[in-house]
């Protein structure tokens, strides 16, 4: 199956359409598992979902899983992905902490990190495949924190963040020095298990990676290209991110 691409005029239009898409799938799967991403790109989608929360069914049976978490940040650290999700979505939806799952990045000690990796992979197996996984794309083509040259057959693991990811994410910190150098991420194999994938891409900085992902070879140098092998992928992009696509 080919990746289905829809291009929107701008970020706001893309975010409204993405919220529509996610709300419909939550309505169809209120007891299911929803896979979420952090970063700037889905923020508009989450805000729109919150604005329309009256349309949502009872969410007490919904479970959420997140792609990744920095290693060495406690869950209540303002730059942790736990904290981001709580502020941008979970509190507004009234989700209880026990409904949402993340890799535990609070202890960067290698043994503790290894235990957190195993625990998260087990939790994901126990929960079962998400009915939808939302993804963003890194400027270097990463998905989750699966950086270029990652293996495709990986499950949850610890990664060393690439210099380009550290630089890109430094905008959320006081300086690049404060950005953790490692993270725990779902592996490529793990995130490919979702029944559907919605990739969001906005801005011209993403145009090259998006073109490679959709029109290039499937290769570890561009981790997102593996999505060509998934049977149910939608890409929602704004015109700037889609500007290099050939049609
Ligand atoms: C976030 C994640 C990353 C981001 C990607 C794009 O949980 O796993 O892969 O989706 O880095 O980030 P933004 O949206 O900030 O450009």
Image: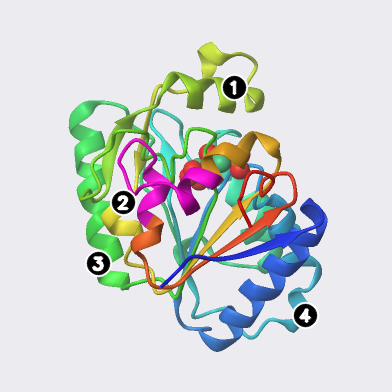
Q: Secondary structure at mark 2?
A: helix
Q: Position of residue 212 (x, y in %)?
A: 48, 44
Q: Secondary structure at mark 1?
A: helix
- Image vertical order of residue 138 relative to residue 11, above or below: above
Mark 4 sits on what residue? 54
Viewer-side residue, 42 vs 85: 42
Viewer-side residue, 172 vs 154: 154
Taking the image in four quarters, ligand 1 sits in the one at top right
Viewer-side residue, 62 vs 22: 22
Q: State yes or no: residue 220 in magenta.
A: yes
Range drawn in magenta: 211-226
Q: Within 10 Å of the Cα at label 4, are there few (<14), some (14-19), or many (20+) other Cα atoms?
A: few
Mark 1 sits on what residue? 170
Closest to the camera, between mark 1 and mark 3, is: 1
Q: Within 10 Å of the Cα at label 3, are there few (<14), some (14-19), or many (20+) other Cα atoms?
A: few
Q: Is residue 125 left or right of residue 233?
A: left
Q: Is residue 16 left or right of residue 93?
A: right
Q: Position of residue 91 (x, y in %)?
A: 66, 59
């Amino acid at each position: 199956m080919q990746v289905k691409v829809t291009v929107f005029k701008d970020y706001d239009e893309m975010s409204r359409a993405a919220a529509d898409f996610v709300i419909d799938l939550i309505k169809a799967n209120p007891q299911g598992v929803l896979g979420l991403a952090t970063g700037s790109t889905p923020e508009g989608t989450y805000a729109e979902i919150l604005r329309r929360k009256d349309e949502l069914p009872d969410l007490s049976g919904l479970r959420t899983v997140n792609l990744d978490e920095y290693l060495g940040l406690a869950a209540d650290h303002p730059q942790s992905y736990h904290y981001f999700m709580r502020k941008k979505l979970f509190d507004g939806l009234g989700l209880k902490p026990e409904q949402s799952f993340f890799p535990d990045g609070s202890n960067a000690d290698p043994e503790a990190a290894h235990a957190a990796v195993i625990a998260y992979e087990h939790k994901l197996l126990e929960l079962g495949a998400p009915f939808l996984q939302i993804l963003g794309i890194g400027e270097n083509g990463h998905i989750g924190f699966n950086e270029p040259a990652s293996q495709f057959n990986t499950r949850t693991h610890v990664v060393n963040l690439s210099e380009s990811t550290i630089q890109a994410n430094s905008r959320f910190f006081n300086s690049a020095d404060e950005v953790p150098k490692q993270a725990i991420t779902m592996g490529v194999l793990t995130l490919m298990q979702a029944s559907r994938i919605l990739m969001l891409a906005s801005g011209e900085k993403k145009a090259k990676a998006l073109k490679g992902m959709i029109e290039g070879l499937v290769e570890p140098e561009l981790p997102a290209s593996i999505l060509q092998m998934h049977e149910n992928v939608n890409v929602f992009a704004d015109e700037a991110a889609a500007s290099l696509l050939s049609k």
